[in-house]
């Protein structure tokens, strides 16, 4: 059967750029917050605060809340996969010592996984030019991160956690597009963050002692991750998924490591060498090709 709302030709460019800027800053927030709390504890606090903020906004604007059990379950599952599993995998891998650049390179496989899944699950067809853009974007991400890709041979368990985060992100985005692309951003976002907060709290109870060093740095990181990333960036992502083909939307994730590198340069003085500068241009070109490729023909939506 055909999807109820055919996707637009492509996501709005300014929204995509704003999403990249906000989402990329999350890697900096993780770096600032993780020294002061365990990853599950940090995530539980982050998602609980984000859920409260979104619920407050939903109440102020009179947003409709999901009432049917099936709708509620779909929204919660999409959030647990695309936000909860992704965040837990990345945060735990970094906490175990995996360099953030390596984790970011693993996550950079996300657009390719989504493009592979968009056909059988959503009926989207990815053209040759779009595939070329996706592969070019991956090359650009590698060039941006190449100087930071030192990997400890004992880091395999941490790398596997980032892989888990990658599969959660890709599955969550596909699930979001198929089952709840039209959810209310604020009410639905509150449900998703609340589900992630409960899951992270269970992880903290099982694996951590719950200690938190309430330093100014940790509070700033927590508020930033909750308000700017979980509320701001994720709301923009859901708008992009709602309005565009998910295989194209995923392409903007190639610019997230670029945004993170620029944030690290601005805040921590981490240099960007000539190869990385070339990589920024290559990644940007790949994203442009992936998002502006001729609109593919629609296949048959699986029933």
Image (cartoon, rainbow, N blue to C red):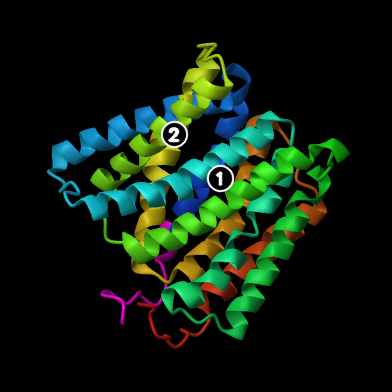
Mark earlier in primary sequence (2, 1): 1
Asked whether 5 or 130 is in front, the reply is: 5
Region of the chain picked out in magenta, as a range: 1-15
Q: Residue at x 74, y 31 (%)?
A: 97
The furthest residue to the bottom: 297
Q: Is residue 289 above or below residue 256?
A: below
Asked whether 149 or 174 is in front, the reply is: 174
Residue 30: percent from left, percent from top: 58, 32
Quarter the C terminus occupies: bottom left
Is the Cβ of the residue at disc 2 closer than 8 Å to that at disc 1? no
Q: Which residue is mark 2?
A: 199
Q: Residues within 10 Å of mark 2 (few under 14, many from 20)?
A: many
Q: Taken as a whole, is the magenta stretch helix, strand or loop?
A: loop
Is 96 on the left or on the right of 25, as rendered? right
Is 19 on the left or on the right of 58, as rendered? right
Q: Residue at x 84, y 36 (%)?
A: 154
Q: Which residue is mark 1?
A: 24
> From where the camera sits, is residue 130 visible?
yes
Q: For the residues carrying marks 2 and 1, which lies nearer the camera in this image?
A: 2
Question: Is 288 covered by the magenta stretch?
Answer: no
Residue 266: percent from left, percent from top: 63, 36
Distance in Å between CA atoms under marks 2 and 1: 24 Å
The furthest residue to the right: 153
Disc 2 secondary structure class:
helix
């Amino acid at each position: 059967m055909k999807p109820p709302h055919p996707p637009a030709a492509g996501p709005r460019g300014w929204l995509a750029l704003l999403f990249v800027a906000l989402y990329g800053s999350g890697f900096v927030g993780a770096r600032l917050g993780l020294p002061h709390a365990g990853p599950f504890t940090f995530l539980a606090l982050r998602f609980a605060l984000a859920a409260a903020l979104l619920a407050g906004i939903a109440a102020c604007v009179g947003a409709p809340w999901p009432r049917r059990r099936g709708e509620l379950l779909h929204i919660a599952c999409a959030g647990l996969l695309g936000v909860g599993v992704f965040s837990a995998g990345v945060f735990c891998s970094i906490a175990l010592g995996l360099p953030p650049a390596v984790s970011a390179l693993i996550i950079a496989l996300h657009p390719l996984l989504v493009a592979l899944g968009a056909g059988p699950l959503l009926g989207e067809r990815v053209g040759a030019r779009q595939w070329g853009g996706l592969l070019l974007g991956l090359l650009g991400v590698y060039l941006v991160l190449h100087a930071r890709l030192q990997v400890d041979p004992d880091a395999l368990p941490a790398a596997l956690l980032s892989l888990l985060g990658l599969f959660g992100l890709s599955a969550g985005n596909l699930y979001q597009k198929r089952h709840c692309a039209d959810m209310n951003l604020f009410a639905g976002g509150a449900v998703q963050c609340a589900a992630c907060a409960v899951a992270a709290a269970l992880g903290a109870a099982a694996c951590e002692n719950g200690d938190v060093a309430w330093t100014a740095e940790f509070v700033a990181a927590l508020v930033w991750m909750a308000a700017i990333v979980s509320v701001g960036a994720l709301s923009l992502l859901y708008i992009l998924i709602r309005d565009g083909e998910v295989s194209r939307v995923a392409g903007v994730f190639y610019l997230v490591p670029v945004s993170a590198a620029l944030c690290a340069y601005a805040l921590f003085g981490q240099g960007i060498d000539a190869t990385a500068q070339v990589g920024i241009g290559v990644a940007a070109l790949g994203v442009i090709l992936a998002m502006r490729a001729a609109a593919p023909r629609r296949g048959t939506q699986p029933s």
